[in-house]
Amino acid sequence: MNFASDNTAGVAPQVLEALVAANAGHAPSYGADPLTLAVRDRIREIFEAPSAAVYLVGTGTAANALACGLLTEPWGTVFCHRNAHIEEDECGAPEFYTGGAKLTLVEGDHGRIDPAALERAILHTGRGGVHNVQRGMVSLTNVTEAGTVYTPEALRELSGIAHSWGLPVHLDGARFANALATLGCTPAEASWKAGADVLCLGGTKNGCMGVEAVVIFDPDRGWEFELMRKRGGHLFSKHRFLAAQMLVWLAGDLWLDLARHANAMAARLSAGIAAVPGASLVHPTEANAVFAALPRAAHQRLQDAGAQYHLWPGDQSMKGPAEEPLAARLVCSWATTEAEIDTFLGHLQG
Amino acid sequence: MNFASDNTAGVAPQVLEALVAANAGHAPSYGADPLTLAVRDRIREIFEAPSAAVYLVGTGTAANALACGLLTEPWGTVFCHRNAHIEEDECGAPEFYTGGAKLTLVEGDHGRIDPAALERAILHTGRGGVHNVQRGMVSLTNVTEAGTVYTPEALRELSGIAHSWGLPVHLDGARFANALATLGCTPAEASWKAGADVLCLGGTKNGCMGVEAVVIFDPDRGWEFELMRKRGGHLFSKHRFLAAQMLVWLAGDLWLDLARHANAMAARLSAGIAAVPGASLVHPTEANAVFAALPRAAHQRLQDAGAQYHLWPGDQSMKGPAEEPLAARLVCSWATTEAEIDTFLGHLQG
Amino acid sequence: MNFASDNTAGVAPQVLEALVAANAGHAPSYGADPLTLAVRDRIREIFEAPSAAVYLVGTGTAANALACGLLTEPWGTVFCHRNAHIEEDECGAPEFYTGGAKLTLVEGDHGRIDPAALERAILHTGRGGVHNVQRGMVSLTNVTEAGTVYTPEALRELSGIAHSWGLPVHLDGARFANALATLGCTPAEASWKAGADVLCLGGTKNGCMGVEAVVIFDPDRGWEFELMRKRGGHLFSKHRFLAAQMLVWLAGDLWLDLARHANAMAARLSAGIAAVPGASLVHPTEANAVFAALPRAAHQRLQDAGAQYHLWPGDQSMKGPAEEPLAARLVCSWATTEAEIDTFLGHLQG
Amino acid sequence: MNFASDNTAGVAPQVLEALVAANAGHAPSYGADPLTLAVRDRIREIFEAPSAAVYLVGTGTAANALACGLLTEPWGTVFCHRNAHIEEDECGAPEFYTGGAKLTLVEGDHGRIDPAALERAILHTGRGGVHNVQRGMVSLTNVTEAGTVYTPEALRELSGIAHSWGLPVHLDGARFANALATLGCTPAEASWKAGADVLCLGGTKNGCMGVEAVVIFDPDRGWEFELMRKRGGHLFSKHRFLAAQMLVWLAGDLWLDLARHANAMAARLSAGIAAVPGASLVHPTEANAVFAALPRAAHQRLQDAGAQYHLWPGDQSMKGPAEEPLAARLVCSWATTEAEIDTFLGHLQG
């Protein structure tokens, strides 16, 4: 019963096999190997973006922070959701890689930026000329940090606002595959056709070992990104082992199959929770994460039974009335089983 | 009728005379001159802080940003009011000098931080261990950006919260003299006795040409500050001319006299506005700035008559219904005259 | 015939097996897994440093740059060899992670810092008080970038100079195992007993896939390092896969066996080259890299035959007299075979 | 007898009068005042650069560091003379404002960069692609730190090398007026016609109180500079007082007259020293600074007599044989008198 994160799961067997296969013989280092070129080409194909610049890094924080560093000046601000990963979970990495840009937090229900709030925030930022930080970029996340999914239309609306101000759009796609599995649209429709200028495509949370692709739809920015990546210590020497993971993951439908499984497990878990008296959903379950409010007593039972998950936000206390609900985040992955879920629900019902 | 800012005024005559007097002969550069030592000693005396480290810089932004750089690590966050000068008017200078720290915006009426909101913000920041930015420091401003004044008791409450979490307190005193003029307490009571670890004591807005003192009550941090100041390009070679300004300003009661005058002018302006039908105060007038909502038609009359001031916030538009009120900031200085105010009020009444 | 780098080789079979084994089931992310704890304990044991702080990252540049960020202030300077990896091959990563520290280049033959030159450089740096950058730290490299090896005595002499000035010592050990294989001393004798305050222990070049350990002998600096690592995007979520590599590598003598093999191959290659008329060694061969000057005609023959290696430095030109020697770097790895070397030597002889 | 620096002198009387005159009434702050516009226009006129962007700051370090920040990316390197002010006397300010760029030190006699050494350094920097820092910019200084003066031809040769590599050229002109006074050419001939893309035109050392102009000959970079200046805390609110200094200084020939005087004094001092047995010049005296080697005994006599100057470099010791020469820097200013020099020479002769 491990719902702590999709990154507590291991690596999908196909990915592991690909790593073993990639080990034969020597290969040029630092990304000049054939597998890296093949990943780049495969991503260009899948995304219908024949000239996109594609780079691999090892962590999602690196991908996001480097993308921000590419898209805004140090005196710019990044408009993002109040609960965006870049705001809450990266220890200031975007500030570091941008040279000290600000993050302007925008409100919106269920992890999705409210378009009117975005418009207001952008308008407000420019009021003071040289005295203010400048409008820098907009960062969106799909799947959101609340486990919800933006439709392409919703992304286009927000990107449209950004672009109307001349601001580039970063799309944090740490769970992009899960969003696609929900939406059923094409990768292009959920990224550049919806206004994303740079997509961080996450492999790690969805069956890979540690690889994220940064897809820059304007390839003229590629060289600058390469320098930033190297300077950040994120250019891997034995680069084929990043590439091998992502290549097999994207070669066929593996990435989507793994995501569909995770989403299906979350749907099962969500439906089960919703049916339990005293339990309720905090956000609609639209991908692979369930946000639910459970009575403190239920949490105690689940934790006693060994269930792994996080109270969310993390500053809630287990001390207090037994019937009072505390919110939790329950994340399913490619490795989650129906049995785990049913066991969890059993303990929840008490 | 210039109420645009207290920095549109010139230099008090006594300060100018001191600059002329300071020009005689050679003097050691970079702060080794006798005037700089005398300023340091005078500040120590006034503040009853015999070992404080004291440094001069040329702008308030430099003073504040360097103080933040001294007090927080790059991975820390600065808890400050949503409308603090360091957030709204310094183009990211605190982010620059801290190496990319975050500013966590705290709410509170009339420019004053609400203690409960500060406590919540500090608590919330620590929820995620290494994944979050860390609690860094608290920044207070007195006079606030809304023209209100914290009492020593109010400062102590906020500083007490900060210190209970081990966080140092920065006090932006760009208008510290104006606050003192209102409070009537001692400089020590409004600074270190109220919990400030570093005070930025502003001279520029109150009759000097361009000088701010950074008073570091823990002198062990002095050398680090000196290096940061030099590295920021803020160590003036002909340093005696910074010192001369501040020395005469602080030598007797000049600083307080100038501030009392500015505050008195603001009180006169505020009372006059409050008596005009259709006009109202946005914030209580407690120092040298008046925040008032005036009908658009009144703004038009005043602007036609040559009155200088800023709509506040700056993203309001002069286009719209004539009777609709727009908020404005009207700042009085040591140089403001009763005649200016009365002329202004005459045009306001229409 | 791939001598381009020790990072063009694949992963040692034992390491690959360990990765497969580590994949079973769920594991806590971000380094809270049992394998990470086991690596930490094993490193403490091997290094006779029971309280050392140990952290894993994915690249050598990350390890070095983070270590520099830990050991010097932004206004400090890093004393290092003119040809150190941190100077020549990291695209300014140390400058990035230190917040803009300087690197002061120190001379010395065959990649080793000359003690007298280090003393002079340190002395000179402090001449100007606040106007200069300050003395920050000393960075040593073993195996050096010239393929030579410092003895513990030589390290102690340089570290002694650093410590006499109060400067901490960073040891870039990207090829630390190769140095140990040459020296035959204990890990402690080649690190903290020789004055290293932080060791970057490289796994990648010597049979791992992508893992480096940063060993901080003063554990009080650990938390700061953790924040810097996260903020740099170098905290891996599926952390067990970093740990698994290094654990098997260090569990017995694997790391030393792999290094001994690489060194032996280099010795064979070096001896072969030295016996060829017109060829000569540029640096003594003391570990796994051979630096040799070969006639341009020999380079042409070798390249035609498919030999992979770099001219060193890289700004030499293949255009020019056939008999003129050009310097090259030839690196052996755990995967280098005697057959490769003998084929290379055959082509060299022409 | 104060030869410690040209910044130990006071302010020229005309400059002080201009400050007093500028104090009348209110003025728009932050550089929107008429004096600032007038300075801009006057600099455009003097430099025959009708569209140049012109900004004022308070210190030379700020001017230089901001210029570097404008001209190179963080992953670039600044090619400069080994003894350039940006390398030796700014505590890493260029590194700070560039976000961590490197300074690559180039050799050359008497403070002047050797063209062949510059060419080699630039060539060498690009050898390693993404692994190296990139070629960023070239920084020249006139008057050099050795008190020598580049001719326009010499500047053109170095700028030509820079531009052939696509690198912009920064000209540190802290003593630009002194260089002009020596050269007798036009300001344009010594700046943009000689290849400078950005000139830092120093007023402080030559009779002003604290003002330097940054002249950006490509005005498209102006807005970026404004943001960097504000973010660095270098945008003065009472900006008219910066402008007033420089306006009077440049209005007629004051700047050149002051510089001619300083240079003439240095020539007198230099000739006097050269005539003393046991004393010798270290660099040719071409502007307002004399670099001379004097016996330790002579230093003792001079210091006993109260002469102010610096041993140069500063890490020489007064302990040692009396007849051994130690090098010193002796700087003349607009305020130096013949009597001071003759007194100095009298003590020198013993």
Image: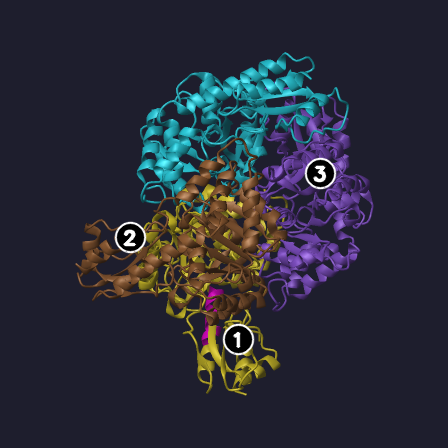
Chain colours: A brown, B yellow, C cyan, D purple
**Vertical position of residue D218 compared to residue A113: above or below:** above
Element type where label 1 sits in the image: loop
Q: What amino acid does circle 3 point to? A: Thr
Q: Residues within 10 Å of mark 1 (few under 14, many from 20)?
A: few
- The residue singled out by tag 1 in the image is B316
* Disc 2: host chain: A
Give the image location of residue A13, x and y in percent. Answer: 39, 43
Kindly report the distance in space between the C-alpha atoms of the residues bearing marks 3 and 2. 65 Å
Element type where label 3 sits in the image: loop
Image quadrant holding the C terminus of chain D, namely: top right
Disc number placed over residue D144 in the picture, else none? 3
Give the image location of residue C283, x and y in percent. Answer: 60, 19
Q: Residues in magenta?
A: B257-268
Q: Quadrant of residue B196?
A: bottom left
Q: Residues within 10 Å of mark 2 (few under 14, many from 20)?
A: some
In the image: residue A317, left or right of residue D23: left
In the image: residue B170, left or right of residue A128: left
**Front position in the image: D322 or C20:** C20
Establish whether labels 3 and 2 are both on one chain: no
Give the image location of residue D43, x and y in percent. Answer: 74, 56
